[in-house]
Image (spheres, grey):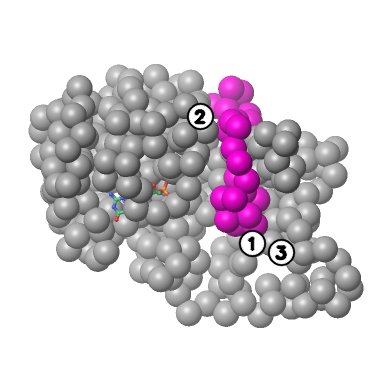
Amino acid sequence: MTTFLSGGTGTPKLLAGAESVFDPADTTVVGNTGDDVELGGLLVCPDIDTVLFEQGGVLDRDRWWGIADDTTETHDELRALADAAGLDSGPRYLPDDAQTAGRDLARWRRFSGVAEFMELGDRDRAVHVTRTGLLDEGKSLTEVTRTLADAFDVPVDVVPMSDDPVASIVHAPETSDYADEMHFQEFWVAHRAAPEVESVEFRGAGDASPAPAALGAIEEGPVVVGPSNPVTSIGPIAAIDGLREALEDATVVAVSPFVEDEVFSGPAAKLMDAVGYDPSTAGVAAAYPFADAFVLDDDDATDLDRPVVRTDTRMDDESDAERVAEAVADALEVA
Ligand code: GDP
């Protein structure tokens, strides 16, 4: 068995070429759910969906989210309708008391569907309608995720980190032009990571239990942390006590999302800086005290206190991913 921890970009990229090194039938992917939102009554799980779509062979690989060649008729109509009605295009949070009412799993990241600030494709939307419907019928997020994985013929086991609500909330300084707290998706999708960040909170993590399948997979190990945002993709997973303790006990290899202090993509550097880690491979190692070995890029000379395997870690296609997966297997040997 091998267990991968996943956000929405780096680990799905690695999984895209990992099957010759890590047998999919013996692979579990634990997905971050701190990024999830409820939008217009639909629970959207962006990180888990990218894994499902990539492994199901339908991912839009240009944007690295959503379904390839999807249409957006409903989304476009929602924008047009809001525009015609003179409604602000959002993000439009539901009122405070509604944030903790209703569907428990969607606490603290519950947005109105008016103007739909995140684009949902039409086929993509069918996934969220099905997920939300099954949750409302009483299934856990773990059960629902596995059902969706079956529907997409996903060869690996995909499970959420928790069946309980955890919301990644970005806090901005008082002097900021933005609200003093916002869900990660408002920060990232609506504001393109522009707000200054004072701190990041994983609301609910203290009360959340690990999903039993996620805990079991980490305990069985070994664990691979694909290139990920240490703050908002791995942070929520490690913020759940049982999962962090299991990570401390497991053999863990992490692939750096940096080449020294150069990030491949996304807001990792800004968020790491905000929470007190150097935005670099050295900072990633500091953020992962549970990691036993690292895979770094050939051009990354960072000196770490744990074993390192080097390769070209840029992944543009499946053969790149296969090369990085082989380096991960080598790192597991020395971890
Ligand atoms: P998110 O959920 O989309 O924020 O993304 P993840 O947490 O999965 O991963 C984002 C991290 O992956 C970023 O910090 C990138 O620097 C890193 N990344 C993206 N593409 C590559 C790549 O080809 N190679 C490596 N090593 N890292 C990458």
Q: Residue at x 74, y 73 (%)?
A: 79
Up-down: is 228 above or below 61? above
Mark 2, residue position: 275
> What crowding class fits label 1: few (fewer than 14 Cα within 10 Å), some (14-19), or many (20 or more)?
some
Residue 234 lies in what quarter of the image?
top left
Q: Is mark 1 within 8 Å of ligand 1?
A: no
Mark 3, residue position: 116
Mark 1, residue position: 118
Q: Residue at x 21, y 34 (%)?
A: 302
Q: Secondary structure at mark 3?
A: loop
Question: Disc 3 residue type?
Answer: Glu
Question: Disc 1 residue type?
Answer: Met
Residue 306 lies in what quarter of the image?
top left
Whichever of callouts 2 and 1 sits on the residue coming sooner in the sequence is 1
Q: Residue at x 37, y 40 (%)?
A: 5
Q: Which residues are magenta?
A: 184-210
Could you tell me residue 310's position as x and y percent?
13, 43
Up-down: is 181 above or below 219? below
- Per the model, the C-alpha gap separating discs 2 and 1 is 26 Å
Q: Quadrant of the N terminus?
A: top left
Could you tell me residue 82's position as x and y percent?
82, 71
Up-down: is 250 above or below 158? above
Asked if residue 216 shows in the view, the reply is no
> What crowding class fits label 2: few (fewer than 14 Cα within 10 Å), some (14-19), or many (20 or more)?
some
Q: Residue at x 59, y 37 (%)?
A: 197
Check contact, mark 2 vs mark 1: CB within 8 A.
no
Q: Which mark is residue 200?
A: none
Check contact, mark 3 vs mark 1: CB within 8 A.
yes
Drawn side of residue 137 relative to residue 239, left or right: right
Q: Secondary structure at mark 1?
A: loop
The total number of labels drawn is 3
Q: Nearer the viewer, residue 318 or 86?
A: 86
